[in-house]
Amino acid sequence: MDFLTGSDDEGSGRRSRGSSGRSGKRGGRRRRRRRNRGGFLAPMLALIILVGVVGGAGYYGYVWLSDVMVADDFPGQGSGEVVIEIKEGQSATEVAQTLEEKGVVASARAFTNAIGDAGKSSSLQPGEYKLRKGMSAALAVGLLDPQKRIQNRFVIPEGYRVSDVINTIAKETGKPKSELLKASRDGEALGLPAPAKGKAEGYLFPAAYEFTDRMSATDIFANMVERYEKEVSAIDLEGAAKKLGFTPHQILTIASIVEAESGKPSDMGRVARVIYNRLGINMHLRMDSTVMYAHNTKGIAATHKQLEIKSPYNTYKYQGLPPGPITNPGMNAIKAALNPTPGPWIFFVTTDPKNAITKFTEHESEFNQFKAEFERNWNNG
C-alpha cells in the first residue's frame, strides 16, 4: 500500500516537472482550443444581449434598430407623373405603402422615415396629388402638402334649386346635365332621408365644394348631402324640430320658403314667424315662391293665371306646407325656421324689390297699402 502511494506521488512530480515535454505540448494545444471557442462565443453572446435589449426596450429599441438600418431611397427628383389619392382616414404608413406600390418611392420605410423627420405624419389630408416615379422620399413628402392638392371648386349659393345646382356643376366640371340629373334622382345612392322621397331639393347644402375628375356625379351630390347632414347635426335639427312640433323635413321646407321670400337675412326671422302664424290659424300660406316652383319658373309675384295651377306646391289653393322644400336653404334660413322672431305678423310685402325692403303687418288693410306700394315701385322700376 505504501508502495502504490509512493508511486503516485512520484508520477505526479514527474508530470509537473515534465511540463516542457511531449505531454506538456498536448496540454498546450488543448488550452488554445478552449481560447478559440471563447472567441467564437463572445460575439454570439453580444448579439443575444443586443436582441434582448431591443426586445426588452420595445418601441424604443425598434426605433434605435431602425436608425442603424438604411432604408432604400431614390436619390433624385424622379420623372413622369403619377396621381396619388390619399383617402379619408389613411395613415402615413398606408400612404407609404401606396407610394412604394406605384413606384414613387423606393421603399415605404424611406417615406415613413422622411415624413417623421419632417414632423408631418399627422398633416396628410385626403385628396389627389401629382407626384413622380423614382423620386426621393423627402421630395415626395413635400409634394403631399395639402396646398398642392389637385383642386377644382364650385360654389352653390343659398336658395339655389336643384336645377340651378345641376347647371353650376355641369359648367364647372364638364359633366353632362343628363348624367347629373339622373344622379340627383337616386335618393338611395345620395343618402337622402326617407321623408325626401328621393328628391334632393333642400338637401344639397349651399357651400363651396372641391371635386376631382375621378369623382362621379353621384359622388358630388353625395358630398353635398353629407355636408347637409353634418351642418344640421351640429345644431341638432331633429331635436329642435321636435320641440316645435315639426319634423326635420318640414323645418327644411319652411326654411326653403324663408330663403326664397326674404329680401335679406335680417328679414328671415320675421318671414318665418308669418309662416308659423298662418299655420297656427289654418290660413293658406299664399306664398308666390311656391307657385313659381310649381311652374318651374322664377319671379316675385305670381299672375292670376299662375295661381290657378293644380299642384300641391300652390299654397294659394292648398292649405298647409307644400310636400317638400322649394330651394336649398342656407344655415341662416334654417336657423330662422327654428327660431322665428316673436311677433303678431300675418302679412308681409317686399315693397321695394330693388333695395330689398320688406314690410310686415298683422292688419289686412295695411297689407293692401303695402301691395299698392309694391306695384308702384315695380311699374316704375
Image (cartoon, grey):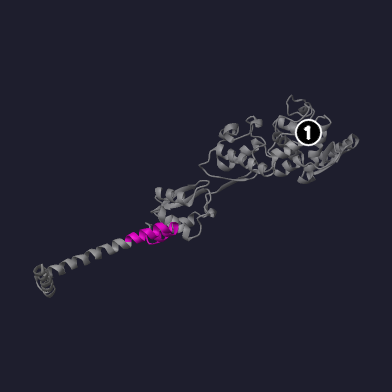
Magenta residue check for 62: yes
Q: Is residue 26 visible?
A: yes
Q: Name the residue tied to disc 1.
A: 287
Magenta residue check for 314: no
Q: Is residue 135 visible?
A: no
Above or below residue 12? Residue 187 is: above
- Pinpoint residue 54: horizontal percent, then vertical percent: 39, 59
218 left or right of 375 in image: left
Q: Say which of 213 and 231 sits in front.
A: 231
The stretch in magenta equals 47-70
Kind of residue at disc 1: Met
Residue 284 lies in quadrant: top right
Q: Residues within 10 Å of mark 1 (few under 14, many from 20)?
A: many
- The residue lying at 75 percent from left, 37 percent from top is 243
Q: In the displayed image of the protein, which residue is found farthest to the right?
A: 365
Instruction: Give the position of the C terminus as an image quadrant.
Output: top right
- Pinpoint residue 278: horizontal percent, then vertical percent: 82, 33
Q: Is mark 1 on a helix, strand or loop?
A: loop
- Pinpoint residue 217: horizontal percent, then vertical percent: 56, 37
